[in-house]
Image: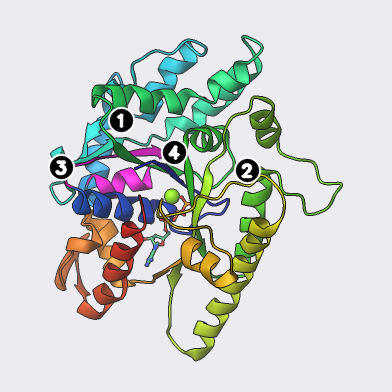
Amino acid sequence: MAIYAIWNNKGGVGKSYLTFQLASEYARQHPDRKVLVIDLCPQANSSSMLLGGMEEGEKHLNSIHGQQPRITISGYISERISSPYKPTNSGADYITQVSLHNDKVPSNVYLVVGDEQLELQSSRVSGATKNGPDDGWRIVHLWITDLITDIKRLWNNEECCVFIDCNPSFSIYTELALTAAERLLIPFSADGSSKRAIKAVLSLVYGWKRQSSDTQSEFFLETARYKMSLPAIYMYIGNRLTQMNNSSASAFRTVVNEISEEIYSVWQSPGNTPFCIHPSNAIRPNTKKSFKNMFQFEVNDANTASVVSGALGIPIGILTAGQKKVAGITITVNQTQLDKQVPNLKTLVECIE
Ligand SMILES: Nc1ncnc2c1ncn2[C@@H]1O[C@H](COP(=O)(O)OP(=O)(O)OP(=O)(O)O)[C@@H](O)[C@H]1O
Ligand SMILES: [Mg+2]
């Protein structure tokens, strides 16, 4: 059980959707463990799905956002802006038990609710990294680590699994998520710009240069200066892969292979990019095939089933086939769509330790 960030430097690749599904399915597979989702994206999409989807979830989000103090990520960040360099020990005040709002999600899932105010707070968070004590940058980058520590303390340090949904941009709160995370899940979609996005992840987080003249990110240089650990690459996940016809399948395969080559070349290069060997008793892959078996995963497109799952806040693992009402419209979920993704996601979650 560990802290996972779900991030790619690209929008719309399924970060929030996978956060919702992974957290719900992990909680279902491990009813004796607590699961924490931290929504570090101002769009709060994973919060909306967890809290009940397009209608119910949005209603709960609005009501949570309307309360003072805000029991959201921004409520916590606001406290930290007032006390940037001294832990507030208050993180546990900011969790919401998801099943109190949406009984379709297992009762062991807890959420630090996303909040659009995060966007407004970001310049003050960045400001705090530049002021204060000499190691102000380091201390501010531990805010989310502190938040998780506070919540774990509330839970008597029972082991729990944490999923952090991130914003696509490499914003300050994405940096905070990545310093808190022990492991990184990188979803990608199989389109033309995916390879560039993966290269951006490798360069922004791990300092990989495309050309020797490239400058490295402040994040990479500062984490190295303070000897802070970076999240270990756990898996890169091709998402929404469809097998509509032979030509689309082969186009997808090309993109997946290119991305796989890119990450495999990093794995093979001398450098400090951390990868997380899993399961924990596995041996280090020594061939390209065993590397791919360990680090590459593919999630199929579930079409209407995924739309309904997200819109109604029903994890796809418990969604049933048949007619569903979404925003007043009747939509049919086919068993074949469920069969495409449900076993797929279950297998993915079985790989999450
Ligand atoms: N495997 C899948 N099958 C079908 N639909 C999917 C799948 N994964 C994601 N989607 C859909 O794709 C859309 C984009 O997904 P999502 O919002 O999770 O992306 P994101 O990476 O979080 O985007 P952003 O960068 O804006 O935060 C959503 O409508 C989601 O329901
Ligand atoms: Mg998102």
Vertical arrangement, residue 158 with respect to residue 24, above or below = above
How packed mark 2 is, by other alpha carbons closer than 10 Å (few <14, some 14-19, many 20 or more), is: many
The residue pinned by badge 3 equals 107
What is the C-alpha distance between the residues marked 4 and 2? 21 Å
Of tags 4 and 2, the one toward the viewer is 2
C-alpha span from label 1 to label 4: 12 Å
Note whether 184 is above or below 244 in the view shown.
above
- Where is residue 305, by image quadrant? bottom left
Identify the mark nearer the N-term, 2 or 3: 3
Q: Are marks 1 and 3 in contact (CB under 8 Å)?
A: no
Between marks 1 and 2 in the image, the one whose residue lies nearer the viewer: 2
Would you say the residues marked 3 and 4 are in contact, meaning their CB atoms lie under 8 Å apart? no
Residue 123 position within the rendered picture, expressed as x and y whole percent measured from the top left: 58, 25
Residue drawn where x is 38% and y is 72% of the image:
301
Q: Which element carries disc 2, helix, strand or loop?
A: helix
In the rendered view, tell whether residue 290 sits above or below residue 281: below
Q: Position of residue 326 (x, y in %)?
A: 21, 62
Answer with mark 3 or mark 4, whichever residue precedes in sequence.
4
Name the residue type under label 3.
Ser
Indicate which disc residue 42 carries.
4
Neighbor class of circle 1 (other Cα within 10 Å; few <14, some 14-19, many 20+) is many
